[in-house]
Image: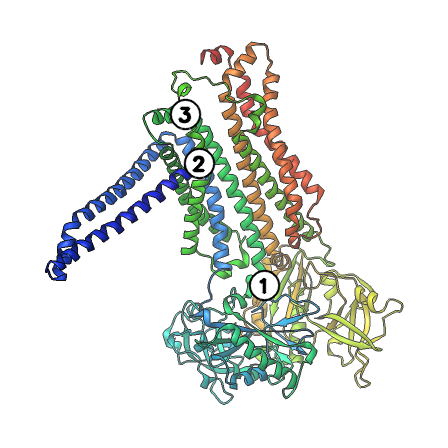
Amino acid sequence: MWSKFASWLRAVTRRSRMESEMDTELRFHMEAFAEDLVRSGVPRQEALRRARMTFGGIERAKEECRDARGVNLLDSLFQDLRYGLRMVRKSPGFTAVAVLTLALGIGANTAIFSLISNVLLRPLPVRDADRLVVLKWSAHGGLGYHGYSDFGFCHIDQTEAEQAGCSFSYPFFSQLRSHPNVFSSLTAFAGNVGVHLSGYGAPRKASGALVSGEYFQTLRVTAAVGRTIQPADDTINSEPVAVLNYGYWQSAFGGDRSVVGKTIYLDRIPFTIVGIAEPNFTSLSPGSTQDMWIPLALYTRLKPDWSGGPDDPGNGWLTIVARLKEEIRVAQAQAAISLFFRNEMLNGTKPTSKDADNPRIILTLVQKGIVGDRWGYEKPLYLLMVAVGIVLLIACSNVAGLMLARGTTRQKEMAVRLALGAGRTRIVRQLLTESVLLSAVGGVVGVLFAYWSLTALRSTNWLGPVDDFAVNPNGRVLMFTVIVSLITGILPGLGPAIRGTRVDLTPALKENAPTLPDVPPRYRWFSFGSALVVAQVALSTLVLIGAGLLVRTLVNLKSIDLGFDANNLLLVGIDPTDNGYKDGQLRSLYRELQSRFSLLRGVVSVTYSSDTLLSGSSWGRTVFTENVEMKMNMLSIGPRFFDTMRIPLIAGRAFTPSDCDSTHKVTIINQAFARRYFEHQNPLGLYLGRSDPNDPGEEVIGIVADTKYDDLKKNIEPTAYLPLKGGGAHFELRTSENPETLISTVQSIVSEFDSHLPRLEYKTEVEQIDRSLFREHLVARLSSFFGLLALILACIGLYGLLSYDVARRTREIGIRTALGAQQRDVLRIVVGQGLALAAVGTAVGIAVAAGVTRYIQSFLYGVRPTDPGTFVGVGIVLALVALAACYLPARRAVRVDPMVALRYE
């Protein structure tokens, strides 16, 4: 094959070189003829015209030959397509199986690539993003910040030796803003800021981002209605203004254009709506959406929960984005800004770093630097892409096996075409055309399958938070599907096409060609079809083992001892602070609500806390007691918290309502706290934070059992519980029945107290835990589905090979039966061959999986990458399914009538 390809390539090269030499010689003779005319007295222009007319006939003849070759090639291609369509229509069963197999593989790849395209590859909604960079810092010992917030805009892997981040202090931003540098524009932003919106319809919660006045100009984002925030709006003395998100404007304001210029109230501060941002801009951070944008100067008036002093050089809370000047490269800008940054950190008004920290700036394009929620989906989606890639390989192998079996039935057709003078290259091209036709149809069906599957995943909430990225088909996904369809058309058809041209004309043209194998029996298992089946089983083994490990991880996470009872718990979030409630009023409100909720039918117990367990958020602090540094998690709780959550009290007492009003500070610690810091003494009666004589700290009045705090995968850490005395709260209602049935009743009770409170947040504890395990659910479910799909395709391939082999060996089986072979002997031959292929494939798959599964170790919990139970379980499943796939061909083999089989020849 390769020698023929090389000969064809040499012939094409030789023909091209000859044509080039002929063109050169033709031009030489034409120029010589024109020079002779000039020497004879003819003007040069006239001589050139006569030369072109004289030699033009030769040029036209050459062009006609080229055109004829092109027409012949195009006509040949159309002939191949017409013949391929006839052959596809002639075998509807084969066509349906092949198209469905390819559609499953292509559709799965299209669906997952659609998620990757929209979640990981979608460009940020800004103009000229290739000149837009985000500033990140890196230092050996950190920057000495005592406060730090990045709001999830950047995800940076840190080590103990090297600290990094993308948040800066406001003083540094001010210095950088006034410093002549390499940027054409500079902006900073922070958020989200939770605000209470009133003045337009019912009061409700909204989210906003604090941005500097140059924000929209730097990003080159325009307004759909009105105007955007300007630098003049970002001053202390400016009137408060806001720019609405386009989607929020449509949903909350009904798309009313007249809202521009009107006044709304955010946390009781009047704001003028000056514009609506363009529709495609929702946020600079992928996966998140702000309802509105507010000038940075309003930081001190809004006083967000995470706020510190705006002029504090030790408080990092701003993300800085800059647009490079046209003539400046990223490396040049990074060197200049790093020098400026180092000088500010070491020698500024209030230095926060030391020389040994080596603080420096890294400039990263916003497309890569601001990842938002993408970082949490990157590894899972790429892992799923590998899985569906393996499924596609199995589908290609399956179709290749089908085409190989079909090619055997077309040997006489190929022999006749070769005998009539058709070239082997032409036959290969014809067979590849048929394969590409099948893949093209499979690609169309696959796109429909991908669209349907994504719709089904959304409706069943399998995609969960991924829907925040607005997953929709686009041009990139369509191009990917076209390329995959082309590849899947060539790969399965190439081997059978080449093999189909290797026909021995003499026996193939006989009226009754023998059906006995053309290779010795001892080599039969090493055929191309057997190799395809082994490859399919090995690949399906690999996918199934990965899926098994991920499913076991999910089971392990769900079986973790939480330390509390998560069943039948309704969580109700409420924040009356935006309505002007003070601490004393809040405590009274919470107690009254707790009393009213307790009287509801089906409610067993009620409590409240500053946050809910396993919500993903945490609050901690460090205290010093008798010169011992104690790091702990903190949670403010109300009365009956431990009873409601069913957390056992080990020693001491729980909080009472009077503890929330008392000036005497008390705390309750968990067992992990007592073990780490009070291993050899009784902590009851001790004080945490006894460093100031005027403030002895909190007295330890109780010890409770350990519970998971914010993350299921984290180890239990020292935790201290404090009485809740102010701020927003989350009520926990323990019920005896479905907690969701109480939502409307709870809402009506709260409205009776204050109808202007923003809408409450409802969820059950089980829902909250499931949401925290979303990535594990997504990967386990989809990998299991793809593993099952791979197993089905591999079994179809095994069934097809054995069916083809039984049909091909009909005369042999008849002779064996006529010579006295029993049905069990025939059954053993067919089943044994199938099980042997499945065993070889399983062994190869297990060997590969033993080395590959370590790459998914970061996804696993409570299970090793080489878990013997998973490997053995997958092997047993494959053996059972392979036995079922072998049964039908074996059953057909034992029913072969010897007389019919021998008469067949």
Q: Which of label 1 and label 3 is nearer to you?
A: 3
- Horizontal side of residue 864 vs 102, given as left or right: right
Which amino acid type corresponds to the residue marked 2 in the rendered image? Answer: Ser
Q: CA distance from mark 1 to mark 2?
A: 72 Å
The relative height of residue 169 versus residue 811 in the rendered view (above or below) is below
Give the quarter of the figure containing the N terminus: top left
Q: Is residue 275 left or right of residue 793?
A: left
Mark 3 residue type? Gln
Q: Compared with residue 809, is residue 639 higher up or lower down, i.e. above or below? A: below
Say what secondary structure mark 3 lies in. helix
Residue on which the image places disc 3: 411
Which residue corresponds to mark 1?
A: 762
In this orientation, which residue lies closer to the viewer: 7 or 864?
7
Comparing marks 3 and 2, which lies closer to the viewer?
2
Q: Would you name the residue on which mark 2 appears?
A: 3
Tell me how far mark 3 sits from mark 2, CA to CA.
23 Å
Whichever of callouts 1 and 2 sits on the residue coming sooner in the sequence is 2
Disc on res. 633: none
Q: As shown in the figure, which amino acid type bears the numbered disc 1?
A: Tyr
Instruction: Give residue 325's position: percent from left, percent from top.
Output: 45, 77
